[in-house]
Amino acid sequence: MLPMAEPAQIETRHRWLIGAFFGVVILPVLLAAAYLWIIAEDQYASTVAFSVRKEEMDSSLDLLGGISKLSGSSTSDTDVLYEYIQSQDLVQNIDRDLDLKAMFGKAWPGDPVFAFDPSGTIEDLVDQWEDQVRVLYDTGTGIITVRVQAFTPEDATAIATAVFDRSSKLVNDISSIAREDMTRYTREELDRAVERLKQARQDLTAFRLRSRIVDPQADLQGQMGVLNTLQAQLAETLVELDLLRESVRENDPRVTQAERRIDAIRRRIEDERNKFTENANDPAAENYATLMAEFERLSVDLQFAEEAYRTALAAHDSAVAEAQRQSRYLAAHIRPTHAEKSEFPRRWMLLGLTGLFALLTWAVGALVYYSIRDRR
């Protein structure tokens, strides 16, 4: 028979393992429990959830009928908002409005783990913000949920409200920039069309003042009427002269008077005709033909300017309507809540994580020790 095995004895290495267990596992767990239940201050949470929405009108009939639809949130806008909530810019703005350092540092220096040192830099405040504010982004629905922790319920609600207000302002700014981009080109075209119309009207007014003719066409028609009347009088006087010559002597005074009348009418007709072609060979001089050409050119410019203005105005109105149709806004799915009891720090969870980490550390150390011992 084989000899009986001797009773197991506790050796030095066993004592070291037991001591290490107490030092690596039991002691940290006791210290963590003491800190969490004795030193750590209660914290309260406030939650707010929102998404970027865009209101769209399909057509003018829908607009008149008041029928609109809400489209899904823009992914790019929501991504920008998600990054903004975690940015230093937002932290600085809220700190300037609410004094975040004082809010996060209310438990300092009694709770150095969870509280913020009010003398810290903005970078330290951003790190504390990442610990106190949790941002969850559902890419499927586009909803952003923000949970804010603070040492009083009022502070948590105030910070959550400030996050929502600042986010809403950012979305409004983005929407304003988008509307400005959509209408900037059409507004510039409208401004140019207005200036062109003003200039065309000023040129036409200057022409009328210089020529002292309001409407050259009406004036020309009046001159043609005078010329036609003179020609009719000339024809009538010629007929009368022929009749006189047939019935009286050649030297009769009435014949002489009729001939003088005919000469006067002919001179007047010639003078009226010269108004249309006077100074035709002088480029600097103005006659009816030159005035009519300039008036027609100015009239065409004015007509073109008016048509361009109407087109530019319609394009600008259409761009403004399209920009308003695609307006963005921040829709709050959950308004900032107000806590009635403390939920943080989650002491049992933190204590369990501390014990698990300590136990894993001790176990790994023990395995490493025995592995090295067995290789000797």
Image (tube, rainbow, N blue to C red):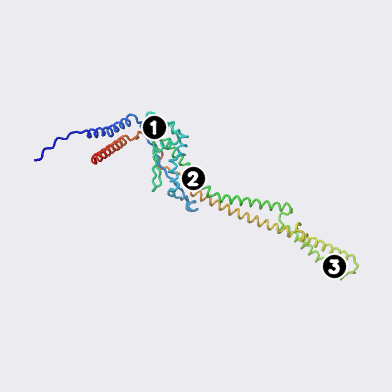
CA separation in Å, label 1 and label 3: 125 Å
Mark 3 or mark 2: whose residue is earlier in sequence: 2
Residue 251: image x %, image y %? Answer: 91, 67
- Disc 3 to disc 2, how far (Cα)? 92 Å
**What is the crowding at mark 2: few (fewer than 14 residues within 10 Å), some, or many (at least 20)?**
some
Q: Position of residue 33 (x, y in %)?
A: 30, 32
Pick out the residue farthest to the bottom: 246
Q: Which residue is mark 3?
A: 241
Front of the two marks 1 and 2: 1
Which residue is under mark 2? 174
Determine crowd level at label 1: few under 14, some 14-19, many 20+ residues with C-alpha closer than 10 A. Answer: many
Q: Which residue is mark 1?
A: 115
Q: Is residue 215 left or right of residue 31?
A: right
Residue 133 or residue 296, whichever sits in front? 133
Lower sequence index among marks 1 and 2: 1
Residue 220: give x, y in percent of width and height: 73, 59
Identified by mark 2, the residue type is Ile
- Displayed quadrant of residue 81: top left
For this rendering, which residue is in front, 131 or 376?
A: 376
